[in-house]
Image (tube, rainbow, N blue to C red):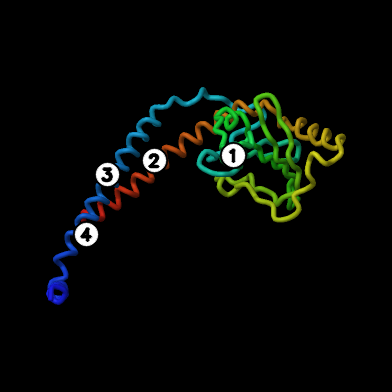
Amino acid sequence: MWKKVLTCALQNQPWRMLPSRTSTSNTVSSAVNAMLLRSLKEHYLEVSKMSPPPKVNPPSPFTIVKGALDGNGPVLRRSYGEEEISISVMRLANIIPGVDKDGDGDIDGDVDDDINQLFLHVDVSKPGQAESLHFLCGLYPDALGIHSVSMRPKVDTSASDSDSASIVVPSTYNGPVFEDIDEKMRDAFHGYIEERDINDSLFPFLQAWLYVKDHRNLMRWFKSVGTFINENESAKEA
């Protein structure tokens, strides 16, 4: 009997249960959004008060690529005779996030390693050549080491927007393991890039540049996420 009465009530007036559920859901959602927006704003203000590192100029004869802070392409470039050389940089953490250096199963969070170990993509191109000579190097405060040498499609370093000259991932043979080639050849490659001023003198500038880029990206992230959530709230209220 009660089942029949309840069924009839739901069929005739189904809206009696729905408003309560929808209202509760909207209230919870708004509360969560408000809490998240407040947290984003607090962290945005906190990060905005951070002091930037002292300004460091790149060593001569390198110049900064226009728009590099807002893109993913080369940061520095220079000419060497008829050659055009461009350098892109990233942190170790961007290539191998959560590295377990000790082999104990725990992710090592040594911030100094992330800051003091950089990776360079160095492209050396010549006019009329479809490919460039590409070096992947590890850069430290007091040293630079080559990890690999390969041939890749030429990077367009003439573009003013660095996004149009982003790092190219090779689709063909990436060259031999650098440590496996003859020692004299390894030394010759090191001499080749050293002659083009690609050495540890680049470290102070590139480290400071990455600090600024990371700070700018974090500020932009807080702002864009907050704007997205706030627009959702405005749509609900409309």
Residue at screen point 57% across, 30% down: 115
Residue under pointer 4:
22
Eye-nearest disc, 1 or 2: 1
Q: Residue 34 carries which label?
A: 3
The answer to whether the residue labelled 3 contacts the one labelled 1, judged by CB atoms less than 8 Å apart, is no
Residue under pointer 1:
105
Eye-nearest disc, 3 or 1: 1
Left of 195 or right of it: where is 25?
left
Residue at screen point 51% across, 22% down: 54
Residue under pointer 2:
222
Left of 217 or right of it: where is 30?
left
The answer to whether the residue labelled 4 contacts the one labelled 3, judged by CB atoms less than 8 Å apart, is no
Whichever of labels 1 and 2 marks the residue nearer the N terminus, that label is: 1
Q: Report x, y in % for residue 81.
A: 76, 37
Front residue of this view, candidates 113 and 20: 20
Eye-nearest disc, 2 or 4: 4
Give the vertical position of 78 relative to 6 (above or below): above
Type of amino acid at the residue the image marks with label 1: Gly
Q: Report x, y in % for residue 73.
A: 59, 44
Real-space CA distance between mark 3 and mark 1, rounded to the nearest whole angstrom: 38 Å
Real-space CA distance between mark 3 and mark 2, rounded to the nearest whole angstrom: 14 Å
Left of 176 or right of it: where is 30?
left
Q: Label 2 neighbourhood size at 10 Å, few (<14), some (14-19), many (20+)? A: some
Real-space CA distance between mark 1 and mark 4, rounded to the nearest whole angstrom: 45 Å
| Disc 1 element | loop
Q: Label 3 neighbourhood size at 10 Å, few (<14), some (14-19), many (20+)? A: some
Type of amino acid at the residue the image marks with label 3: Ala
Eye-nearest disc, 4 or 3: 4
Whichever of labels 2 and 4 marks the residue nearer the N terminus, that label is: 4
